[in-house]
Amino acid sequence: MRAGVILLNFGEPADPTPENVIAFLERIFFANASLEDAPDEAARRLRSRQLAERRAPGLIEEYLEIGGSPMNEQADGQAHALSRELGERGHEVRVYAAFQFIQPLVADVARQARDDGVEWLVGLPVYPLCGPSTNVAALDLVEEAAEELGWQVEMRGITGWHRHPSYLDLRADAVRAAVDGAGWSFDDPGTRLVFSAHGTPLKYIREGSRYVEYVEEFCAEIGDRLSADYEIGYQNHSNRGIEWTTPDVENVVRSLSEQRVVVDPVSFMHEQSETLAELDHELREVAEEAGLEFLRVPIPHDDARFAHVLADLVESQLPESGGSSELRLAPCRCRPRDGTFCLNSLPRVASVTAR
């Protein structure tokens, strides 16, 4: 049975023209249209267009400031690395990179996988911390694409995977390397660690999303590995007049009494506008205005161990694994549908086995 994997990513416009950026933003706002009341689809689309046109100039400026987003290239690199790793483990698996909001869109990649003769498909979102508009929504897109194609494919989806011990190790090591490289130390009381998580609307939390729980759990694991005290802040967006997660990371940084701040963007496995512009430029400015030295931890997107993490996840869902994979996943609670699995539904103790 020919197997395939679609790595699901957010995506950012490689060419940040007004046309490309507005189309990109329209897709995002429409996908989250339920955050606001609208009587019908036409009203939701009109509102999405309005929000996109309002946000586009500032986002284009950010893309130009950072010299373009490297996100899509890094996502493609992760797909190639996963393909190599699976091949070295003896699996013949086609690996694709798809994006929720830019080309190649999930529907286009699903069509390609069908045309390639894939009969067993694993969808794997490259979002470390499971949320409804990321991991869950991305897998929904795969399922919808298969249905629209009339594609009778065996499908497995993987949602939450931040508990994988090798992933925890590589993220802790990235923080440690950045701090050591700067000549700083968490043993110094003048140095403070701040985890910056992408914010989420409180409506999603009230509807049952465990995203904040996962953020807090992950940060506790990394803080423990580093023997470091820390704060958590959220990168929120003000595009809509709705409530978001608190505290804002800017307010967290302003409140620090230390001399140095180390910021680790825990919600991402790619460099993108949220890291290269929002953190490296905007949050740095906030820190320096508060009299703080600022260090942002680079995203370890090309750490060789990450391909092993992804391969462990995929291998657990391949038909030939026959239950022999060392990694154990459980039915997902965030996306309670047949064929969807995660690490978050397992007891924390001995929930996974590192390779």
Image (cartoon, helix red, strand yellow):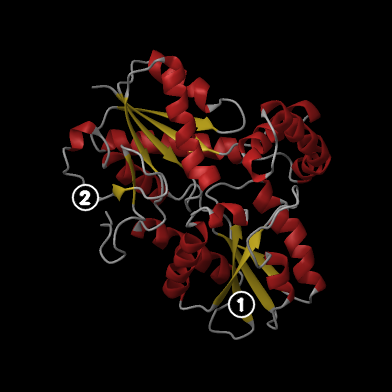
Q: Find numbered disc 2 in the image and state the secondary structure of the residue it sits on.
A: loop
Q: Residues within 10 Å of mark 2 (few under 14, many from 20)?
A: some
Indicate the quadrant containing the N terminus: top left, top right, bottom left or bottom right.
top left
Q: Nearer the viewer, residue 111 or 42?
A: 42
Q: Is residue 9 above or below residue 114?
A: below
Front-most of residues 86 and 249: 249
Residue 321 x/y as whole percent? 19, 38
User: Does residue 132 appear to the left or right of 200 in the view shown?
Assistant: left
- The answer to whether any part of residue 183 appears in the image is no
Q: Amino acid at mark 2?
A: Glu
Residue 243, given in percent of the width and then of the height, sits at 68, 57
Q: Sequence order check: which comes first, mark 2 or mark 1?
A: 1
Residue displayed at 46% across by 68% down? 222
Pointers 2 and 1 in contact (C-beta within 8 Å): no
Query: Where, quadrant-wise, is the C terminus in this rendering?
Result: bottom left
Relative to 326, 70 lies left or right: right
Q: Residues within 10 Å of mark 1 (few under 14, many from 20)?
A: many
Q: Nearer the viewer, residue 239 or 72?
A: 239
Q: Nearer the viewer, residue 249 or 66?
A: 249
Figure check: 285 above or below 321: below
Residue at x-position 67% and y-position 65%: 249
Report the residue at 67% width, 50% height from top. Answer: 274
> Is label 1 in a helix, a strand or a loop?
strand
Q: Seen in the image, is 315 located left or right of residue 299? A: left
Residue 98 numbered mark, or none: none
Q: Would you name the residue on which mark 2 appears?
A: 326
Residue marked by disc 1? 192
Q: Is residue 255 visible?
A: yes
Residue 226 shown left or right of residue 59 in the figure = left
Give coordinates of residue 285: x percent, y percent: 79, 64
Q: Position of residue 6 (x, y in %)?
A: 42, 31
Give the amino acid type for the residue marked by disc 1 in the picture. Arg
